[in-house]
Protein backbone atom coordinates (compact mmCIF):
# COMPACT_ATOMS: atom_id res chain seq x y z
CA UNK A 1 0.00 0.00 0.00
CA UNK A 2 2.89 2.35 0.83
CA UNK A 3 4.41 1.86 -2.61
CA UNK A 4 1.12 2.60 -4.40
CA UNK A 5 0.27 5.86 -2.64
CA UNK A 6 0.07 8.77 -5.07
CA UNK A 7 0.11 11.75 -2.69
CA UNK A 8 2.77 14.17 -3.91
CA UNK A 9 3.68 12.16 -7.00
CA UNK A 10 3.99 13.81 -10.40
CA UNK A 11 3.29 11.93 -13.64
CA UNK A 12 4.65 13.76 -16.72
CA UNK A 13 2.21 13.98 -19.61
CA UNK A 14 0.86 16.12 -22.44
CA UNK A 15 -2.83 16.25 -21.61
CA UNK A 16 -4.90 19.43 -21.51
CA UNK A 17 -4.78 19.39 -17.71
CA UNK A 18 -0.97 19.02 -17.75
CA UNK A 19 -0.66 22.07 -20.01
CA UNK A 20 -2.76 24.36 -17.82
CA UNK A 21 -1.01 27.10 -15.89
CA UNK A 22 -0.27 25.95 -12.30
CA UNK A 23 -1.95 29.11 -10.98
CA UNK A 24 -5.15 28.17 -12.81
CA UNK A 25 -5.05 24.64 -11.41
CA UNK A 26 -4.49 25.85 -7.85
CA UNK A 27 -7.36 28.33 -8.15
CA UNK A 28 -9.46 25.60 -9.76
CA UNK A 29 -8.96 23.30 -6.76
CA UNK A 30 -9.80 25.98 -4.18
CA UNK A 31 -12.90 27.09 -6.09
CA UNK A 32 -14.00 23.48 -6.53
CA UNK A 33 -13.71 22.91 -2.78
CA UNK A 34 -16.13 25.79 -2.22
CA UNK A 35 -18.49 24.69 -5.01
CA UNK A 36 -18.80 21.13 -3.66
CA UNK A 37 -20.75 22.40 -0.66
CA UNK A 38 -23.47 23.79 -2.95
CA UNK A 39 -24.62 20.24 -3.76
CA UNK A 40 -27.30 18.85 -1.47
CA UNK A 41 -29.36 16.30 -3.43
CA UNK A 42 -28.98 13.32 -5.76
CA UNK A 43 -28.98 15.39 -8.96
CA UNK A 44 -26.29 17.84 -7.83
CA UNK A 45 -24.06 15.09 -6.45
CA UNK A 46 -24.50 13.17 -9.69
CA UNK A 47 -23.32 16.26 -11.58
CA UNK A 48 -20.27 16.49 -9.29
CA UNK A 49 -19.39 12.86 -9.97
CA UNK A 50 -19.75 13.35 -13.72
CA UNK A 51 -17.64 16.51 -13.67
CA UNK A 52 -14.91 14.81 -11.61
CA UNK A 53 -14.77 11.83 -13.98
CA UNK A 54 -14.53 14.26 -16.91
CA UNK A 55 -11.53 15.98 -15.32
CA UNK A 56 -9.88 12.60 -14.68
CA UNK A 57 -10.49 11.61 -18.32
CA UNK A 58 -9.02 14.89 -19.61
CA UNK A 59 -5.93 14.44 -17.43
CA UNK A 60 -5.30 11.01 -19.04
CA UNK A 61 -4.68 9.53 -15.60
CA UNK A 62 -6.11 6.02 -15.44
CA UNK A 63 -9.04 5.80 -13.05
CA UNK A 64 -7.84 2.42 -11.80
CA UNK A 65 -4.43 3.89 -10.95
CA UNK A 66 -6.10 6.78 -9.12
CA UNK A 67 -8.43 4.56 -7.10
CA UNK A 68 -5.67 2.06 -6.32
CA UNK A 69 -3.42 4.83 -5.02
CA UNK A 70 -6.13 6.24 -2.78
CA UNK A 71 -6.92 3.06 -0.85
CA UNK A 72 -5.98 4.61 2.53
CA UNK A 73 -8.43 7.42 1.81
CA UNK A 74 -11.08 4.88 0.81
CA UNK A 75 -10.79 3.33 4.26
CA UNK A 76 -11.41 6.75 5.83
CA UNK A 77 -14.40 7.34 3.51
CA UNK A 78 -15.94 4.00 4.49
CA UNK A 79 -15.37 4.78 8.17
CA UNK A 80 -17.09 8.18 7.78
CA UNK A 81 -19.98 6.53 5.94
CA UNK A 82 -20.46 3.99 8.74
CA UNK A 83 -20.41 6.74 11.38
CA UNK A 84 -23.34 8.48 9.68
CA UNK A 85 -25.17 5.18 9.27
CA UNK A 86 -24.82 4.28 12.95
CA UNK A 87 -25.24 7.63 14.70
CA UNK A 88 -27.63 9.74 12.58
CA UNK A 89 -31.13 9.04 13.83
CA UNK A 90 -33.43 11.12 11.64
CA UNK A 91 -36.10 10.17 9.13
CA UNK A 92 -37.82 6.84 8.62
CA UNK A 93 -36.31 3.59 9.91
CA UNK A 94 -35.03 1.53 6.97
CA UNK A 95 -33.65 -1.41 8.93
CA UNK A 96 -34.13 -2.37 12.57
CA UNK A 97 -31.83 -5.08 13.91
CA UNK A 98 -32.70 -4.57 17.56
CA UNK A 99 -29.24 -3.53 18.70
CA UNK A 100 -28.86 -1.17 15.72
CA UNK A 101 -31.22 0.82 13.51
CA UNK A 102 -30.47 2.39 10.13
CA UNK A 103 -32.38 5.58 9.38
CA UNK A 104 -33.14 7.13 6.02
CA UNK A 105 -31.39 10.42 6.80
CA UNK A 106 -28.30 8.60 8.10
CA UNK A 107 -28.01 6.64 4.87
CA UNK A 108 -28.54 9.76 2.76
CA UNK A 109 -26.00 11.84 4.65
CA UNK A 110 -23.49 8.97 4.66
CA UNK A 111 -23.67 8.61 0.87
CA UNK A 112 -23.49 12.36 0.22
CA UNK A 113 -20.58 12.97 2.59
CA UNK A 114 -18.68 10.02 1.08
CA UNK A 115 -19.23 11.39 -2.44
CA UNK A 116 -18.13 14.86 -1.34
CA UNK A 117 -14.99 13.46 0.23
CA UNK A 118 -14.13 11.36 -2.83
CA UNK A 119 -14.55 14.10 -5.44
CA UNK A 120 -12.40 16.47 -3.35
CA UNK A 121 -9.64 13.89 -3.01
CA UNK A 122 -9.78 13.04 -6.71
CA UNK A 123 -9.52 16.66 -7.85
CA UNK A 124 -6.71 17.54 -5.43
CA UNK A 125 -4.84 14.39 -6.47
CA UNK A 126 -5.14 15.39 -10.13
CA UNK A 127 -3.45 18.70 -9.22
CA UNK A 128 -0.34 16.99 -7.82
CA UNK A 129 -0.29 14.24 -10.46
CA UNK A 130 -0.33 16.70 -13.38
CA UNK A 131 1.79 19.52 -11.90
CA UNK A 132 5.47 19.32 -11.02
CA UNK A 133 6.52 20.46 -7.51
CA UNK A 134 8.52 23.33 -9.03
CA UNK A 135 5.45 24.58 -10.92
CA UNK A 136 3.33 24.31 -7.79
CA UNK A 137 5.93 26.38 -5.91
CA UNK A 138 5.95 29.07 -8.61
CA UNK A 139 2.15 29.14 -8.76
CA UNK A 140 1.72 29.45 -4.99
CA UNK A 141 4.38 32.15 -4.82
CA UNK A 142 2.73 34.24 -7.54
CA UNK A 143 -0.75 33.84 -6.05
CA UNK A 144 0.52 34.88 -2.61
CA UNK A 145 2.53 37.77 -4.09
CA UNK A 146 0.23 40.53 -2.77
CA UNK A 147 0.98 39.39 0.80
CA UNK A 148 4.60 40.47 0.38
CA UNK A 149 3.45 43.98 1.26
CA UNK A 150 2.54 42.59 4.69
CA UNK A 151 6.13 41.32 5.08
CA UNK A 152 4.98 37.73 4.68
CA UNK A 153 7.82 35.41 3.53
CA UNK A 154 5.88 34.23 0.49
CA UNK A 155 8.76 32.51 -1.31
CA UNK A 156 9.86 30.60 1.78
CA UNK A 157 6.30 29.46 2.52
CA UNK A 158 5.81 28.27 -1.06
CA UNK A 159 9.13 26.46 -0.97
CA UNK A 160 8.30 24.70 2.30
CA UNK A 161 4.92 23.55 0.98
CA UNK A 162 6.50 22.29 -2.23
CA UNK A 163 9.28 20.40 -0.43
CA UNK A 164 6.76 18.86 1.98
CA UNK A 165 4.60 17.75 -0.94
CA UNK A 166 7.60 16.38 -2.80
CA UNK A 167 8.87 14.31 0.12
CA UNK A 168 5.55 12.58 0.89
CA UNK A 169 6.07 9.80 -1.71
CA UNK A 170 9.76 9.59 -0.76
CA UNK A 171 8.89 9.00 2.89
CA UNK A 172 6.21 6.49 1.90
CA UNK A 173 8.76 4.53 -0.15
CA UNK A 174 11.22 4.70 2.75
CA UNK A 175 8.52 3.43 5.12
CA UNK A 176 7.85 0.48 2.82
CA UNK A 177 11.54 -0.45 2.70
CA UNK A 178 11.95 -0.23 6.48
CA UNK A 179 8.76 -2.23 7.00
CA UNK A 180 10.02 -5.02 4.75
CA UNK A 181 13.40 -4.99 6.51
CA UNK A 182 11.72 -5.28 9.91
CA UNK A 183 9.47 -8.10 8.70
CA UNK A 184 12.52 -9.93 7.37
CA UNK A 185 13.94 -9.72 10.91
CA UNK A 186 10.81 -11.31 12.39
CA UNK A 187 8.83 -8.19 13.32
CA UNK A 188 5.07 -8.65 12.85
CA UNK A 189 3.06 -5.41 12.88
CA UNK A 190 -0.13 -6.72 11.30
CA UNK A 191 -1.14 -9.27 13.92
CA UNK A 192 -1.33 -9.73 17.66
CA UNK A 193 -2.83 -7.59 20.43
CA UNK A 194 -2.98 -3.80 20.04
CA UNK A 195 -0.28 -3.32 22.69
CA UNK A 196 2.12 -5.59 20.80
CA UNK A 197 1.38 -3.82 17.51
CA UNK A 198 2.21 -0.46 19.07
CA UNK A 199 5.50 -1.84 20.37
CA UNK A 200 6.30 -3.21 16.91
CA UNK A 201 5.77 0.24 15.33
CA UNK A 202 8.58 1.81 17.40
CA UNK A 203 11.40 0.07 15.45
CA UNK A 204 9.72 1.38 12.30
CA UNK A 205 9.41 5.02 13.40
CA UNK A 206 12.93 5.51 14.73
CA UNK A 207 14.81 4.72 11.47
CA UNK A 208 12.15 6.62 9.52
CA UNK A 209 12.74 9.80 11.57
CA UNK A 210 16.52 9.36 11.32
CA UNK A 211 16.25 8.99 7.54
CA UNK A 212 13.96 12.04 7.26
CA UNK A 213 16.34 14.26 9.24
CA UNK A 214 19.27 12.98 7.17
CA UNK A 215 17.48 13.85 3.93
CA UNK A 216 16.56 17.29 5.30
CA UNK A 217 20.21 17.92 6.24
CA UNK A 218 21.45 16.82 2.81
CA UNK A 219 18.89 19.07 1.11
CA UNK A 220 19.88 22.06 3.25
CA UNK A 221 23.57 21.47 2.49
CA UNK A 222 22.89 21.16 -1.25
CA UNK A 223 20.88 24.42 -1.27
CA UNK A 224 23.61 26.20 0.69
CA UNK A 225 26.51 25.16 -1.55
CA UNK A 226 24.51 26.27 -4.59
CA UNK A 227 24.16 29.74 -3.13
CA UNK A 228 20.45 29.66 -2.41
CA UNK A 229 19.38 32.90 -0.71
CA UNK A 230 15.59 32.91 -0.82
CA UNK A 231 13.25 34.76 -3.15
CA UNK A 232 14.85 38.21 -3.14
CA UNK A 233 16.09 38.96 -6.66
CA UNK A 234 15.63 35.38 -7.88
CA UNK A 235 14.75 34.79 -11.52
CA UNK A 236 12.91 31.78 -12.97
CA UNK A 237 13.98 29.47 -15.74
CA UNK A 238 10.34 28.59 -16.48
CA UNK A 239 8.01 31.54 -16.95
CA UNK A 240 4.31 31.18 -16.18
CA UNK A 241 2.01 32.15 -19.06
CA UNK A 242 -1.71 32.61 -18.48
CA UNK A 243 -3.66 31.65 -21.61
CA UNK A 244 -7.29 31.57 -22.65
CA UNK A 245 -7.64 27.89 -21.73
CA UNK A 246 -6.73 28.78 -18.14
CA UNK A 247 -9.49 31.37 -18.02
CA UNK A 248 -11.86 28.91 -19.68
CA UNK A 249 -11.18 26.28 -17.00
CA UNK A 250 -12.28 28.71 -14.29
CA UNK A 251 -15.32 29.78 -16.32
CA UNK A 252 -16.33 26.10 -16.52
CA UNK A 253 -16.31 26.05 -12.72
CA UNK A 254 -18.56 29.09 -12.64
CA UNK A 255 -20.96 27.32 -14.99
CA UNK A 256 -20.84 24.24 -12.76
CA UNK A 257 -21.63 26.35 -9.69
CA UNK A 258 -24.60 27.92 -11.47
CA UNK A 259 -25.90 24.51 -12.57
CA UNK A 260 -25.60 23.09 -9.07
CA UNK A 261 -27.39 26.10 -7.62
CA UNK A 262 -30.22 25.70 -10.15
CA UNK A 263 -30.78 22.03 -9.27
CA UNK A 264 -30.18 22.55 -5.57
CA UNK A 265 -33.07 21.59 -3.30
Image (cartoon, helix red, strand yellow):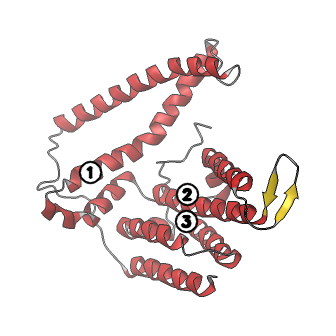
Return the residue found at the far left: 233
Labels 1, 3: front one: 1
Q: CA distance from mark 2 to mark 1?
A: 23 Å
Residue 46: quarter of image: bottom right
Snapshot quadrant of residue 226 = top left
Quarter of the image with the C terminus is bottom right
Element carrying mark 3: helix
Which element carries disc 1, helix, strand or loop? helix
Q: Earlier in the sequence, mark 1 or mark 3?
A: 3
Residue 208 in the figure: left or right of residue 102: left
The local secondary structure at tag 2 comes to: helix
Q: Position of residue 178 (x, y in %)?
A: 53, 23
Marking on residue 59: 3
Q: Position of residue 5 (x, y in %)?
A: 57, 43
Q: Which residue is mark 2?
A: 121
Rounded to the nearest whole Å, what is the CA distance between mark 1 and mark 3?
28 Å
Tag count? 3
Mark number, residue 157: 1
Amino acid sequence: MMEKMIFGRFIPGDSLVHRLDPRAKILFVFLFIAIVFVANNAITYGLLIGFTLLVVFMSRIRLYFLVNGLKPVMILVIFTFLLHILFTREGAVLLDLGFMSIYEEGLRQGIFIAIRFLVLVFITSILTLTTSPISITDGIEVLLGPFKRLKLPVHELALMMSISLRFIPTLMDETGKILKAQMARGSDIGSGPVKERIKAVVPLLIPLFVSAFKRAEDLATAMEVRGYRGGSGRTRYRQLNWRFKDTASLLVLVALAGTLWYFRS
